Image: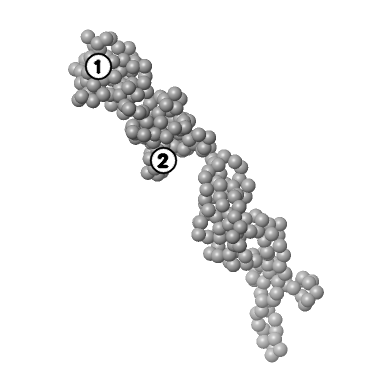
Amino acid sequence: MANYIINECLTNDEYIVSGAPTFTSGQTIWFIFNEGSYCGTVAEVTSSPPTAEFYQLSTDCCDCLSNITESLNFKFIRCDTSEEINIEAINFCDEYGVPTTGITYEIQYGSETSFCATFSGLSSTGVTNYHYSSGPFLLCEDCQGQLPVYNLNVTATTCDGYSQLIILPGDVGFDESKIYQLPNGQCVSLTSGETVSFYADSMIIAGPFDDCDECAQPFSANTGGNNGEVCVIDCSGNTVTVTPPHPVYTNAQNQAIVQINAITIGGNGLNS
């Protein structure tokens, strides 16, 4: 009677079971260790003595685990967080099989954006409608590196309180306590939402600003090298520096621009 190395389904830990009946590599068995029930797959024959006792054959790891638990559910920890996600195992089992403890997988809830999470064991409860997407990956970074780049839903609130939903490029960073200017010239505060796979429809063109007044101030165009200042001789014959009035125009982004390498003459609107 041969002895066999058995790799436990959830952890890949090795146990040795005596082959009665004779096993075939890849078969799944239910075995007993220290009076506890476990499931594992048959690896190879070994000369080492048994450490566990064979109970019965199973179709696969999911089938076996379903027999030794009241309700088969998997527990994951979402990458880069401590968020625990407990999922009902049926979809994951159908689409992949049993995950391995400490290994990372890409999973998805319904039609939402997929994410990476590391398997940490069984759970007593689980949420339905989670699905396996890809994996396994040794590290979260390996999983996250292969995900597509997603953009970000953002709520943009104007200084007078009007809110609208925009989509910013996913790699754009911003401070939710600051004010920014959008391409349409609006000064807004920004609040992050969920990631989406849609194209970005807006961008930040200026900021951050501490408040709306600072955001609304005109920007300066070409200075000509002297910040728009000119030297004049006053009535006493002294040479003094003055800052004359400069023309202000609105660009294609509805943004006020001070053209400080030009000056406004008199009240006729002519520029020099």
Q: Quadrant of the C terminus?
A: bottom right
Say what amino acid the circle numbered 1 marks: Phe
Say what amino acid the circle numbered 2 marks: Cys
Mark pair 1, 2: CA separation? 37 Å
Left-right relation of 107 to 43: right
* Image spot of residue 6 (x, y percent): 28, 20
Query: The residue tagged with tag 1: helix, strand or loop?
Result: strand
Q: How is the image coloured?
A: one colour
Which sits in the foreground, 137 or 223? 137
* Residue at 68% in and 57% down: 253
Which sits in the foreground, 91 or 81? 91
* Residue at 52% in and 45% down: 194
Is residue 234 something one can see in this rendering? Answer: yes
Q: Is residue 164 above or below residue 85?
A: below
Q: Quadrant of the N terminus?
A: top left
Q: Is residue 241 above or below residue 33?
A: below
Q: Are marks 1 and 2 in contact (CB under 8 Å)?
A: no
* Image spot of residue 53 (x, y percent): 22, 18
Query: The residue tagged with tag 2: helix, strand or loop?
Result: loop
Q: How many numbered discs, if any?
A: 2
* Residue at 27% in and 14% down: 45
* Res 68 quadrant in image: top left
Residue named by callout 1: 54
> How many residues crowd around disc 2 within 10 Å: few (fewer than 14), some, or many (20 or more)?
many
Residue named by callout 2: 79
* Image spot of residue 235 (x, y percent): 71, 89
Left-right relation of 227 to 133: right
